[in-house]
Amino acid sequence: MTTTQTPTTATDTTTTTTTEEGAAKDGSYAPEEAPRLQWAKFAPEVYKAMVGLDAAARRGVDPVLLELVKIRTSQLNHCAFCLDMHTKDAIAAGESVERIVQLSAWEESRHFYTEKELAALALTEAVTVLTDGFVPDEVFETAARHFDETGLSQLIASITVINAWNRFGVTCRLTPGHYTAGQYK
């Protein structure tokens, strides 16, 4: 794949032209938009606190499971920046592309995941979406059968933290596509 970036005007962002099978007929994609706000630059103490909270939440959580949870949460929240980041981190952690692709339809693709992963994904959706205003007892109880109290607490914390990161990403329209696996670890 060949990629070139050229400014469209002095004030515009750059237009990325990518040559590969499936690109637009002229070989280019839509122009890349700059983020609305570089929030971490203007709220560095909040950013540092989020990084610390993220590190505390992930303690003891299997890294591959954690990335699956982060990808699924980011899918639900439509956070392209976090999808880019956590997909790359999942692959670097040894996750298969096939399982990542199936995450958006995990309920129909149950055979790709362990029972523990399925419980974590169900909990992820319940905590993230909250359509009924609460996490259903059945979802919580299923997760509690697969995780001890510490593990379940860490998982809930991890789900909560990625939801917060997603809110920053979506609100500020952080730009996906420039992350390198492990860049922020």
Image (spheres, rainbow, N blue to C red):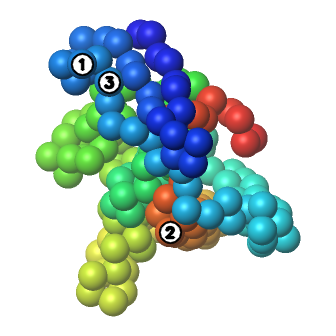
Label 1 belongs to which residue?
Answer: 26
Per the model, the C-alpha gap separating discs 1 and 3 is: 6 Å
Q: Crowding near pointer 2: few (<14 within 10 Å), some, many (20+)?
A: few
Q: Is residue 139 above or below residue 136?
A: above
Along the line of sight, which residue is nearer the eye, 38 or 57? 38
The local crowd at label 1, few if under 14, some if 14 to 19, many if 20 or more residues have their Cα within 10 Å, is few
Q: Which mark is residue 171?
A: 2
Q: Position of residue 167 (x, y in %)?
A: 52, 69
Q: What is the distance, in whole Å, between disc 1 and disc 2 at their CAs?
A: 32 Å
Mark 3: amino acid: Ser
* Number of the label disc, if any, that sits on residue 28: 3
Residue 82 at x, y percent in the picture: 51, 49
- 39 left or right, relative to 22: right
Query: Is there any visible trace of residue 175 in the rendered image?
Result: no
Element at label 1: loop
How many numbered circles does the render carry? 3
Query: Which one is in front, 82 or 37?
Result: 37
Question: What is the three-letter code of the residue carrying label 1?
Answer: Asp
- Where's residue 66, x and y in %? 54, 48
Helix, strand or loop at mark 3: loop
Please give the name of the residue rendered at 38% of the width and 19% of the height, measured from the top-left corner: 18
